[in-house]
């Protein structure tokens, strides 16, 4: 029986061929995604940044180069600064309410013995609804301001007069409309995330806590559940913050971006709505692009600060 031995050069060549085939296969699978990422994300970002440095009026091509004038004009524009104030107020409402409500729902569903899948589905369904469609339902049916509106019909049972929920500055009932539609749309999504994290907590921790004398739901929640949900909680807070700063549909469709009720948009106009009006109504695409980059910078800044405050990504070992 003869044994054939390959010389070292032959083995090196075969390894190189195998490595080349693996590399080519990798890039063959990755190329479509990378090309799409470059064409539909990289190029628009670069184009938009160059556009923000130009006086691009009524054109999306590079106009007269003006440097950072679009940025300085926006940062000194009272209406844009007011839009930033509006989105901060909206964020202060929506982030803590969404966080607490989604955690509470997750805790309730997690305790259900039977029908857990049913409740998960019911609370998650609103996530699949379009923001624009939900906003129009809130505006035209639930909070339409007439005596036949759903909410006014309920309040009439308690002897209350119809309330103009949208369109009055004092009292600012429109905030109730804006906040409730956002909560209804997104709370189910965050509830699912919390629920998945709750199911990953070892049951032995609760058994050990009971043996150590932990009594009552609050003690278990404070010393077992919440510490185990720390990473998930920080992630959800970051997602809620980013989503709040990107608010557009509910403001535009509820307060009226066009038509007879378009004047109501001045009651609460977030940055994206203001940038939209500059870019499409005034056709100042350079200024609109600059506003987009300013908002992006603010989102990144608040995200980093919030992540640092809550220690997002830090190891818990040794603590």
Image: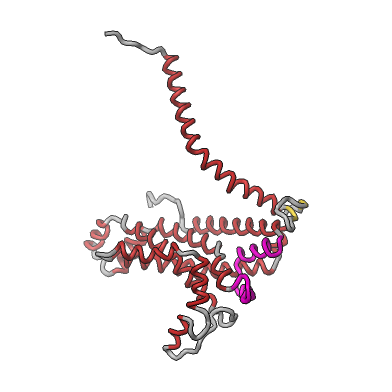
Residue at the spot 26% in from the left edge and 8% down from the top edge? 1
Q: Quadrant of residue 246?
A: bottom right
Residue 252 horizontal/vertical position (percent): 58, 69
In the displayed orientation, state which residue is furthest to the top.
Answer: 2
The magenta region covers 256-283
Magenta portion: prevailing SS class: helix
As displayed, is residue 50 above or below residue 81? above
Tell which of 193 and 234 is nearer to you. 193
Is 6 displayed left or right of 2 in the figure?
right
Residue 319 horizontal/vertical position (percent): 38, 52
Q: Is residue 69 visible?
A: no
Residue at the spot 59% in from the left edge and 70% down from the top edge? 86
Magenta segment: does it hold 152? no
Is 115 displayed left or right of 93 in the figure?
left
Magenta segment: does it hold 274? yes
As displayed, is residue 144 above or below residue 44? below
Residue at the spot 38% in from the left edge and 66% down from the top edge? 123
In the displayed orientation, state which residue is furthest to the left.
Answer: 211
In the displayed orientation, state which residue is furthest to the right.
Answer: 64
Residue 13 horizontal/vertical position (percent): 45, 18
Residue 303 horizontal/vertical position (percent): 53, 57
């Amino acid at each position: 029986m003869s044994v054939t031995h390959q010389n070292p050069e032959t083995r090196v060549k075969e390894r190189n061929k195998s490595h080349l085939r693996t590399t080519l296969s990798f890039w063959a699978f990755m190329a479509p995604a990378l090309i799409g990422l470059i064409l539909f994300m990289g190029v628009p970002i670069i184009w938009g940044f160059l556009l923000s440095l130009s006086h691009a009026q009524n054109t999306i091509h590079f106009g007269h180069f003006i440097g950072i004038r679009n940025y300085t004009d926006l940062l000194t524009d009272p209406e844009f600064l007011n839009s930033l104030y509006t989105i901060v107020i909206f964020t202060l409402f929506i982030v803590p309410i969404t966080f607490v409500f989604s955690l509470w729902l997750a805790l309730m569903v997690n305790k259900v013995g039977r029908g857990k899948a049913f409740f998960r589905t019911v609370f998650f369904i609103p996530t699949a609804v379009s923001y624009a469609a939900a906003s129009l339902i809130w505006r035209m049916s639930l909070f339409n301001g007439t005596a036949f509106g759903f909410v006014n019909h309920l309040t009439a049972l308690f002897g209350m007069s119809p309330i103009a929920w949208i369109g009055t500055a004092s009292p600012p009932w429109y905030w109730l409309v804006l906040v409730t539609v956002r909560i209804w749309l997104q709370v189910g999504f965050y509830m699912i995330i919390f629920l998945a994290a709750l199911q990953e907590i070892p049951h032995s921790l609760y058994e050990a806590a009971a043996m150590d004398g932990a009594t009552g739901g609050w003690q278990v929640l404070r010393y077992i559940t919440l510490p185990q949900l720390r990473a998930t909680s920080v992630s959800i807070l970051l997602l809620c913050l980013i989503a709040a700063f990107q608010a557009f549909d509910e403001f535009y469709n509820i307060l009226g971006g066009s038509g007879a009720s378009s004047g109501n948009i001045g009651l609460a106009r977030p940055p994206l709505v203001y940038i939209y009006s500059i870019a499409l109504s005034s056709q100042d695409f350079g200024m609109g692009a600059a506003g987009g980059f300013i908002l992006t910078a603010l989102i990144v800044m608040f995200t980093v600060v919030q992540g640092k405050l809550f220690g997002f990504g830090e190891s818990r070992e040794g603590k």
